[in-house]
Amino acid sequence: MVLGVILLGFQNYVRERLGEELWRTIRNEAGVAERVYLPSQSYPGEELSALATSMSRMTGMSPALVLESFGDTLASDLLKVYGNLIDPRWRVLDVIVHSEELIERMAQRSGDVTPQSPVTARWGRDGEVVLVYQSHLKGCALIKGIVRGLGANLEQPVILDEGRCMLAGATACEMAVRLERTTQLTERAQGLARRLTPPAMSRSALKAALFGDRSDMPSVPPPPASSSKQEVLSAWRTETKTSPPASSVAPARISSLPAAPNLPSTPSTPPPSEGGDTSEPWRRR
């Protein structure tokens, strides 16, 4: 038997993606054109298989892919309808471990007197959960979709490692479920940040990086303490002539100033006296 909430969820799933007209076509091909699904009832599981097969023919998706995609969206509906059966302290792996008990209690609410869950679960090694599914419907794809959807809705993403599958000829489906380790992404990001962050530089190393190496440029030796200005200039001219710089730009040279021209001396005219006599010498001996 299949819960009515599952078949009602499949109906909404098809309507939202394909529209009302295609849903009627899929329902007619599956032979359930007159069926009305109620969340409080249980229905034969073959109806879900027939609907998934009909949608597979309409869309080109495999029946397993149809069921897995549907199961991913069904998880939120199950949490809304049966969320009060879940202990608020449980994490997603705790919910999966108690899946057998939860499925049977869900079936009892839908009127199934002797429910039998097709799913069993137990704790495995390294904190993972081993989930086993066995049913003649071979709907393990639906279980995988629901498990992934639960992890997404509870904000605890999970990874499934399938060990054996009924679709591959096994007598039961077995898969290991574990939490996705998001810390690996954090460590990778931190390692990348460390590689992109330059190391701390000393003051001398920073100065050399900013201004470059000046060792190839000619330097002017410091003048002796007792040297005169003329001796310093003469030594600098000699240095620049004998040791030109590596670049093609010639250094500036200090040219000597031209001598002042010899101008004829002009006799000085004494200032006039108070009486207006200009012949009187300006200064009497």
Image: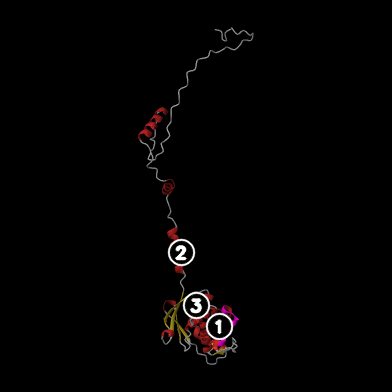
Q: Find the residue positioned furthest to the left.
A: 242
- Residue that mark 3 sits on: 148
As for residue 220 lying within the magenta part, the answer is no
Q: Amino acid at mark 1?
A: Phe
Task: Please name the residue shown 41% across and 27% down the image.
Answer: 230
* Crowd band around label 1 with a 10 angstrom C-alpha radius: few (<14), some (14–19), many (20+): many
User: Which quarter of the figure has residue 130?
Assistant: bottom left
Work out whether 191 lies above or below 40. Answer: above
- In the depicted structure, whether residue 263 falls above or below residue 29: above
* Residue 63 x/y as whole percent: 49, 83
Picture coordinates of residue 256 (x, y %)? Answer: 43, 27
> Which residue lies at the image location 42% right of the left edge and 59% below the top edge?
195
Q: Please name the residue that numbered disc 1 is placed on.
A: 10
- Cα distance, mark 1 to mark 2? 40 Å
* Along the viewing direction, whichever of 272 and 205 lies nearer the viewer: 272
Calculate the distance from the C-alpha at mark 1 to the C-alpha at mark 3.
17 Å
Reading the chain from its start, which is encountered first: label 2 or label 3?
Answer: 3
What span is in magenta?
17-28
In the rendered structure, are the residues bearing label 2 and label 3 in contact, judged by CB atoms less than 8 Å apart? no
> Where does residue 71 sit, x and y in percent of width and height?
52, 80
Which amino acid does the dot numbered 2 rest on? Ala
Give the Cα separation between the discs numbered 2 and 3: 25 Å
Which residue is the site of mark 2? 189
The main secondary structure of the magenta stretch is: helix
* Camera-nearest label, 1 or 2: 1
